[in-house]
Amino acid sequence: QVQLVESGGGLVQAGGSLRLSCVASGSVFRFNVMGWYRQVPGKQRELVATATSGGSTNYADSVKGRFTISRDNAKNTVYLQMNSLKPEDTAVYYCNLERYGLGHLGANWGQGTQVTVSS
C-alpha cells in the first residue's frame, strides 16, 4: 500500500508564498512521477506540475515562472514552492504518485490540502 501525506497549505495574501510538501510511504517503486494537481468546486482536477524520478519537470502554463516543483528521492518527498500567488490559485491541492515498472503500475492520491489566496 502507498500513502501520500501532504502539508503546507493555508491562507495567504495575493503576492505571497507557500510551500507544499508530500511524503510518500510504502511500495513507491524506483521509477515514478510525483506531482501536484488542484481542484476548485465544480471544476475538473487540473495539472499543476509534475517531476519524474529522473528529474524532468512539467508545469501548467498558468503557474510557469511562479511555481517550482522539486523532489528528494531519498525521502520520497515532493515539494511545490508557490510564489507570487494569485486569488485564482485558490484550490484544494492534491499530491499524486504514478508508479512505473514494466508499464504503468498504478496511481495514488493524497487527501488534499487547501490553499486560499486572498485579494
Image (cartoon, rainbow, N blue to C red):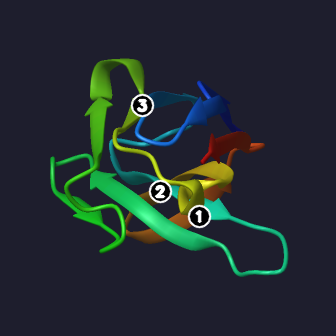
Q: Nearer the viewer, residue 8 or 52?
A: 8
Displayed quadrant of residue 79:
top left
Q: CA distance from mark 1 to mark 3?
A: 32 Å
Q: Residue at x 27, y 37 (%)?
A: 70
Q: Which residue is mark 1?
A: 106
Q: CA distance from mark 2 to mark 1?
A: 5 Å
Q: Nearer the viewer, residue 80 or 57?
A: 80
For image coordinates 47% across by 29% down, the residue present is: 18
Most foreground residue, 56 or 79: 79
Q: In the rendered structure, find residue 33 and report the number of the disc placed on it.
A: none
Report x, y in % for residue 45. 66, 73
* Secondary-structure class at tag 3: loop
Which residue sits furthest left? 55
Task: Establish if 57 lies above or below 17.
Answer: below
Q: Nearer the viewer, mark 1 or mark 3?
A: 3
- For badge 3, the amino acid type reads Ser
The structure residue drawn at horizontal position 30% and vertical position 28%, both measured from the top left corner, is 73
Label 2: which residue? Answer: 99
Pick the front one: 78 or 114: 114
Whether the residues at callouts 2 and 3 have beta carbons within 8 Å, the answer is no
